[in-house]
Amino acid sequence: MSTFTILLGGELKRTPRLERQIAGSRIIAADAGIGHATALGVVPELWVGDFDSVPVDLPDALEAVPRMTFPAEKDKTDGELAVEAAFARGATAVVLAGAFGGPRADHAFLHMVLAMRLTEAGIDVTLTSGSQEGVPLPSGRARFDYEDDTLFSVLGFSDLTGLSLAGAKWPLDNVQVPFGSSLTISNEVRGGLEVALGGGQAMLLAHPYP
């Protein structure tokens, strides 16, 4: 598996879990995401964007990162272009670091739906801010390694069928969840979380570092 970490412009907190997730991965920065490189102790191999939000006083090592420059008026975000650059370099899995928060809620939403589209294409995707992370849920069964009491929600982006939650404070067994329902918001891990999904589009959003 060839994992790439994409540094995005949202909030990012360095945590032991984040360090494990990006260890050994190749790094690409998307515009302002280069600002996270110093805190993470990494130097990207590529810097993608229109460079309209470049952080000031970057270290020389980051200023020297090779750039792939695009016009400000374009039909894709810098983050999506960075993901495409990763695939062009052989990525089979991506960590979208800095995918949440920041000044642009529309970009955060785009990162979530982009991650679900990539998952449907067979790509392993994790979105993270360090303190919270999102994992698209494919049809079938998935297990997660979160500690007990970790807060999590299942975000439905469509009607959900056959949803089951085991290892949760409030388990579910093969339920149907209408689009827009809050039934699956604010649950807690109890003894090893396992999620099964029959159909629909959903994402697990967990808070391992509240």
Image: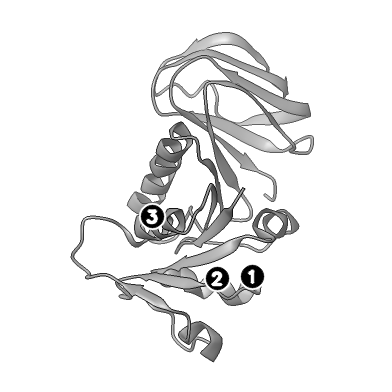
Task: Please provide percent x and percent y for residue 52.
Answer: 30, 75
Determine the residue located farthest toward the left in the rendered image. Answer: 73
Residue depicted at 47% across the width and 60% down the height? 10
Q: What residue is disc 1 on?
A: 40
Circle 1 sits in a helix, a strand or a loop, which is it? helix
Confirm or deny contact between disc 1 and disc 2 (CB under 8 A): yes
Report the mark closest to the observer, 2 or 3: 3
Q: In the image, what residue type sits under mark 3?
A: Glu
Residue 84 sits in which quadrant? bottom left
Residue depicted at 40% across the width and 37% down the height? 117
Gap in angstroms between the C-alphas marked 1 and 3: 22 Å
Q: In the image, what residue type sits under mark 2?
A: His
Q: Is residue 141 visible?
A: yes
Confirm or deny contact between disc 2 and disc 3 (CB under 8 A): no
Q: What residue is disc 3 on?
A: 84
Circle 2 sits in a helix, a strand or a loop, which is it? helix
Report the mark closest to the observer, 1 or 3: 3
Q: Is residue 82 left or right of residue 69?
A: right
The residue nearer to you, when weighing 124 against 181, is 124
Q: In the image, what residue type sits under mark 1?
A: Leu
Q: What residue is disc 2 on?
A: 36
Residue 23, numbered label: none
